[in-house]
Amino acid sequence: MLHDEFETLVKSLCETAGLPEALALLKQQEDEAIVEAANSLAGQFQLAEIEGEQRIYHVSMQENDNGEEEEYAEWIMNVGDDVIKFVAWFFYDQFEIKAKDVYQAAGRTYQQPKRS
């Protein structure tokens, strides 16, 4: 995928209403790698209310140190957050494209999360 095509895709994804719509748009792309990656994530997101927030998690099975399958949940974003958070996560998780580069493609400034 050319850089200008990537920018156009990221900007289109950022105009969607949320994670489900962005994932649906990813599944409709011409690039087979993107479609395959998006399809592989189907059914792997769960909503949980924690500390009064509606959080969206990516839930997958991973092998632990003992070689046993274990459920792993990664917090992606909250309901109502800017969908760029999901877009940046998707491209990093699936294609190892840094969040900074995804934000830049969207014409936005990426701010590193503060460490606690």
Image (tube, rainbow, N blue to C red):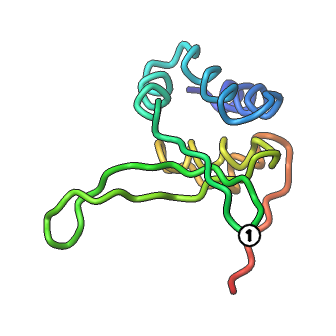
When the figure is inspected, residue 65 is found, relative to residue 94, above or below; the finding is: below
Q: Quadrant of residue 62?
A: bottom left
Q: x, y percentage for residue 41? A: 46, 35
- Name the residue at 72% across, 53% down: 54
- Name the residue at 71% across, 28% down: 4
When the figure is inspected, residue 27 is found, relative to residue 112, above or below; the finding is: above
Q: x, y percentage for residue 12? A: 77, 25
Residue marked by disc 1: 112
Q: x, y percentage for residue 106? A: 80, 40
Q: Looking at the picture, which amino acid does disc 1 mark?
A: Gln
Q: Quadrant of residue 22?
A: top right
- Name the residue at 79% across, 66% down: 111
Quarter holding the C terminus is bottom right
- Name the residue at 77% across, 63% down: 52
Side of 16 where 35 appears, left or right: left
Side of 19 where 41 appears, left or right: left
Side of 94 where 5 appears, left or right: right
Q: Which residue lies furthest to the left in this view?
A: 67
Helix, strand or loop at mark 1:
loop
- Label 1: few (<14), some (14–19) or many (≥20) C-alpha neighbours in 10 Å: few
Q: x, y percentage for residue 37? A: 44, 31
Quarter holding the N terminus is top right
Residue nearer the viewer, 98 or 73:
73
